[in-house]
Amino acid sequence: MSMYIAGAVLVATTALSANVQRNAAKNAKKDAKKQAIEDEKNLRKAEVFAETEGAGVGNLGKVSMEIDDELDQELKLGKVRI
């Protein structure tokens, strides 16, 4: 009788192990797919950056703190206190 119980435990353990392996393989495949999409997105960003030679990134713009001499002469601004 104990042989039948031991055999049943062995079969159950083997089935459980196979199920765990299938789930792990499924999860690994899903993670690999997500990683491939992320890698492709990063590749496209790197290509755009390389084509523009780093001229700009995304929606960021350049801010210039220079003063335009023509504009100052037109407005004839008075004294400014800070």
Image (cartoon, grey):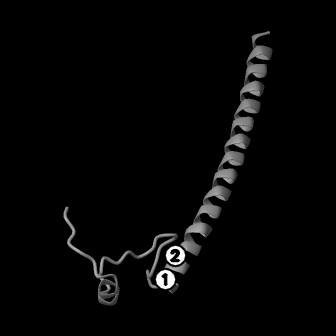
Q: Which residue is drawn at 46% across and 70% down?
A: 60
The quarter of the picture where residue 4 lies is top right
Q: Position of residue 45 (x, y in %)?
A: 55, 73
Q: Which mark is residue 50?
A: 1
Task: Determine whether the residue tagged by mark 1 lies in a helix, strand or loop.
Answer: helix
Q: Which amino acid does label 2 sit on?
A: Ala
Q: Is residue 70 left or right of residue 23?
A: left
Q: Position of residue 18 (x, y in %)?
A: 73, 37
Q: Which amino acid does label 1 sit on?
A: Ala
29 relative to 60, above or below: above
Q: In this view, does 54 lie to the left or right of 8?
A: left
7 relative to 55, above or below: above
Q: Position of residue 41 (x, y in %)?
A: 60, 67
Task: Determine whether the residue tagged by mark 2 lies in a helix, strand or loop.
Answer: helix
Q: Residue furthest bottom?
A: 70
Quadrant of the rendering where the N terminus is positioned: top right
Q: Which of 75 and 20 is in front in this view?
A: 75
- Label 2 neighbourhood size at 10 Å, few (<14), some (14-19), many (20+)? few
The answer to whether mark 2 and mark 1 are in CB contact below 8 A is yes
22 relative to 76, above or below: above
Q: Nearer the viewer, residue 6 or 47?
A: 47
Quadrant of the rendering where the C terminus is positioned: bottom left
What is the spatial separation of the Cα atoms under label 2 and label 1, in whole angstroms? 6 Å
Q: Nearer the viewer, residue 1 or 41?
A: 41
Q: Residue at x 74, y 36 (%)?
A: 19
Reading the image, the residue beneath label 2 is: 46
